Image (cartoon, grey):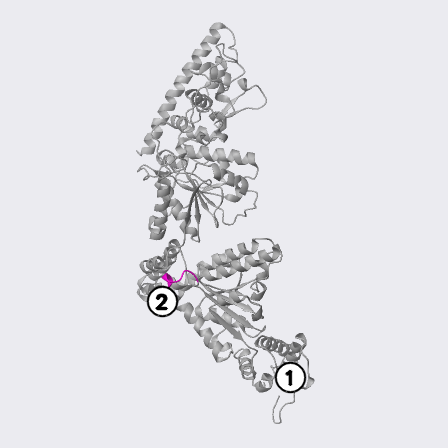
Amino acid sequence: MSARSDWLDANNAFLTSALAELRSRLTALAEEHHRNDRVVPAMPAAPMPEPHARRGFGGRRHSDDASAAPAVLRLEPAEPPPTAQPTISPAAADPDAHGTGDESGAPADSASTPAVVPDQPALLTLADRLGLTDFERDVVLLCAAVEFDTGLGGLMADALEPQHRYPTFALALAALPDPSWDALSPDGPLRYWGLIHVDPGGPIISSRLTVDERILHYLKGLTYLDDDLAGLLSPLPAASADLLPPSQSAIVESILEALRLRQGTAVPVIQLLGAGEEGKRAVAQAVSARFGAPLLALAADGFPVDDARAETLTRLIRRETALNPFALFIDVRDVERTAPQVPPLGRWLGRTDQLVFLDAADPWPAIDGAVADVGKPTPAEQHAAWSEQLPPAVANAADRLTGQFDFELPTIHRIAAQATARAAASGDGGAPASDAAEQLWQDCLLQARPVMDQLAQRITPLGQWNDIQLPADELELLHEIAAQVEQRSTVYDGYGFRDKLNRGLGISVLFAGQSGTGKTLAAEVLANGLGLLLYRIDLSAVVSKYIGETEKNLRRLFDAADGGGAILFFDEADALFGKRSEVKDSHDRYANIEVNYLLQRMETYRGLAILATNLKSALDTAFVRRLRFIVDFPFPGVSERRKIWENVFPQGLSVDRLDFDRLAGLDLTGGSISNVALNSAFRAAHAGGDVDMPTVLASARVEFRKLDRPIAESEFAWTAPEGSSA
């Protein structure tokens, strides 16, 4: 038999003995009742007992005294006991008896908390952890007894009043040893912790007392989360110690050292900052595991707004922690500081003595605790993980993956496992190494997509290098940008520049030129050539009139893009990146704060950001200084326009009847030429003919009118050359 089964047998034996003693006391009281042929008065004849000192409470109100917390909440770092098992649900607690537990022991329909096998019966553990006197402990047993033994109801009626076939405080005072009147006071542990409930509407002395259902099951050894917490708390998947890189392991040790210095005092709140989302959870799990406590997630947006409900919930959480110690992980990164949940949540965090990890973007003030900055694994740690986990066929892809993507170790292991599974399934006749590497690259891109798709518009890049027509110098700059993106890992890590630079590791590029000169096409060409995702940033969704909202939107955007695999394309960037204005009022001051934040965030962004503007002169000089490249997109000349006309029509479409020299003479940008080509194709399709010069010139005339350009009819007249069939 398991240790858990042995304890359940011992606990049942204890309850059987305790119930037998209680039955004996009730029987004696009933016999005295019949012998005297009278009803025992509701109040005992003896003088009212003096209040008893409560272990762990000192007779003071719990909400006003932090020392009123159960001592079990003051944890000390230690290796988890060898008997600590993730036995969670009643069904899984004893598989031999129930036969319905799964391997994890967690019920399918509710959150649960792992429990250490106790070393004493549940009733005694309850009394110790919640500071009950012997009388208060016996009151709990009295209320639970009618649930365990239905025959006790009649005996209770015989012992006191015939109409009361249930526990009352009068019965407890008469039947139990060392009675105490203050046991049922509102700030006493029985009612403060919600162990028993008093039926409303009548005298307290004769009202029915019922034991809380959660406590009833606890006395029988069944461990689960209270139903009122099941929707607010949820278990976090256990993290493997192998997925904690050395840099994050060092953070775990620093947190434990900070906690060791506070031994004997309340455990502080640990605020976890930084970009390592999975790393924060792994660090929190590693610390809580050293306390022998599981980690549960608390939904911050579900925390009550009303103070009364928040206090009730706080007591319930503390009670659950006392019965089955656990740590909490609260993600408040996206919780507005002005949200109604924040004040009650902040007050609770300011006085809780529970082990709590707060995942925050910025430190929360007025919280006594430690602060740790948890970043993602270092590039060297990521490279080592890729090299160790990838199958041999694509092991040489570690350099490229490390240079482009910034993943945490669980993500790297997951993607590498997919590549290994594909390699094993293909066997000796598998796909070539180049195909396997391309599939691996696509897996990484898919990992980066979900978050970014919610924040920006993804563009499918179709442009090729031969589609873009620029002067030689500008075209060379585009090729240099692509080369720097590809060689970042070599330069930063191989050559050691990462140790020399603490910012500016990303590549920020400015595309300046009139609308339609090819800025968006150039972004597509880079994304297509590099095999990266391209996202257009909608500035109308980023810039907000509300103070602080723009910075929050930018932070969320850059944090999501920092995972790699994405090129950020800010179109019409001058709307946000304009010159910082002279401060004349509060609006100017906050506008400048937004620009300053953007300048700082651009320097720390590790990817490629492309900023497009029609007004280069409108950009702040401090911002221009921080750009790696500036590419000018001039209005295309005649030779460039001719090449654009030659490449604008799809292959397979007959364009033999077009005079490209004549079309190149039209003063249009590449974007306008694309519009003319498309409109002329629709005209030809409607007429049932081919794309010819009259059709193209007619569409060009429409484009000129749209642009409010002067129209000379002679430019759009067409006379077919002699001998031509046009």
281 is higher (above) or lower (below) than 142:
below
Type of the residue with mark 1: Pro
Residue 157 seen from this side: yes
Name which quarter of the figure residue 551 lies in.
bottom right
Image quadrant holding the C terminus, namely bottom right
**Can see residue 432?**
no
Relative depth, front residue between 513 and 197: 513
Which residue in the structure is indicated by mark 2?
490
Point out the stretch of residues depicted in magenta: 497-503
Q: Which quadrant is the N terminus positioned in?
A: top left
Residue 404 drawn above or below residue 199: below
Please say whether residue 499 is one of the residues in the magenta stretch: yes
The first of marks 2 and 1 along the sequence is 2
Residue closer to the observer: 345 or 261: 261
In the rendered structure, the answer to whether residue 170 lies left or right of residue 100 reads right
Residue 659 image position (x, y, % from top left) = 58, 86
Total count of labels: 2
Crowdedness near tag 2: few (<14), some (14–19) or many (≥20) residues, C-alpha within 10 Å: some
Q: Furthest residue to the top?
A: 36
